[in-house]
Amino acid sequence: MSERDKDEGRSRGEQWWETSIIEMMPGIIRLRGYEIQDLIGRVSFPAMIWLMLRGELPGEQQAELLGIALGAAVDHGPQAPSIAIARMAATCGVGINSAMASAINVLGDVHGGAGEQALAFYGDIAAAMDAGAAIEQAVASSLDKFFAEDRGYVPGFGHRFHPIDPRAPRLLEITRNFAARGVVGGRFAAIAETIEAEIARRKGKQIPLNIDGATAVIYGELGFPPPLTRGLFVLSRSVGILAHAWEQSQRGERNKGPLPREWLWAYSGALKRGLPDEDDTGG
């Protein structure tokens, strides 16, 4: 039993949960050891995210770069399933928290998971480089394996809507600027650029980096593991989800579904038929 537990009259047997994130008792709130009143007004929201996830405060420029990545992915319009779902939920009369939860719950492997997958892919290439492979060799070998497994699209590259995702080149440019200042190493940016060049060589056309691949570069440069990349995307996209859910809730529309009511779905089932006669049932 620690001296603090003795002083506060608590035994470990009375401690149901254990966490290194927050300490709280009447009149005291400490996050990772820092008094909340000391953090308020002095630490930015991106820096607070970093502190909560990593346990230490980031440097000012690290927090700035994290905030840039978070800000870049906040919205992609109602053509994105999560945004459309938030708006549809709002027309059903649910509260804003339920509309947001409905949207966030569809951010899975297909819609929302590409950043995590991209960073894991970058990480495999970085591991091969650590083992002595040149970056071009590591990228080529990883792509050989990827395509041999018939895994479809390389995560983080190409976009079904944008010929060139306008967010990605800007994020890569910013990452390079931060690397030039020594804030990050630039390794993941180089990996992404080499992947893009190798895909273009193999396909005979450019399949450019997209928002998921670009934010994965930044999160990798900042040292976040791949699973947290998905969580950070959820935090980012929640801003757009909130904005759309709120806007839709103010419009007064009711039960607005995924299609205009005059447009019905394609039915591919059985043709119209009647029930069998009683005499044909064998009864």
Image (cartoon, grey):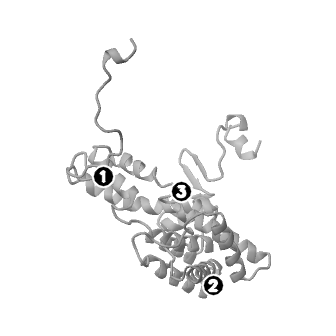
Rendering coords of residue 120 (x, y %) = 64, 65
Q: Residue at x 59, y 68 (%)?
A: 118
Q: Residue furthest top?
A: 283
Which marked residue is nearer to the observer: mark 3 or mark 2?
3
Front one among 119 and 218: 119
Q: Looking at the figure, which quarter contains the C terminus?
A: top left
Which of the labelled discs sits on residue 109, or is there none?
Answer: 3
Above-or-below relation of 39 to 5: below
Which residue is located at x 40 percent, y 74 percent? 162
**Type of amino acid under label 3:** Asp
Q: Is residue 38 among the parts visible in the rendering?
A: no
Name which of mark 3 and mark 1 comes first in the sequence: 3
Which residue type carries mark 1? Pro
Instruction: State the separation of the CA atoms marked 3 and 1.
Output: 21 Å
Q: In x, y percent, where is residue 219? A: 58, 70
For residue 259, above or below residue 71: above
Could you tell which of marks 1 and 2 lies nearer the N-terminus?
2
**Which type of secondary structure does the marked residue at label 1 adopt?**
loop
Q: Position of residue 127 (x, y in %)?
A: 74, 72
Quadrant position of residue 8: top right
Q: Position of residue 99 (x, y in %)?
A: 36, 49
Q: Amino acid at mark 2?
A: Gly
What residue is rendered at 75% in x and 74% in y?
128
Please tell me the numbered disc located at residue 182: 2
Q: What's the CA distance linking mark 1 and mark 2?
A: 47 Å
Mark before the other along the chain sequence, 3 or 2? 3
Select label 1 or label 2 by which is in front: 1
Q: Residues within 10 Å of mark 1 (few under 14, many from 20)?
A: few
Identify the image quadrant of the N terminus.
top right
Q: Badge 1 is on which residue?
A: 258
User: Is residue 231 in sight in this rendering?
Assistant: yes
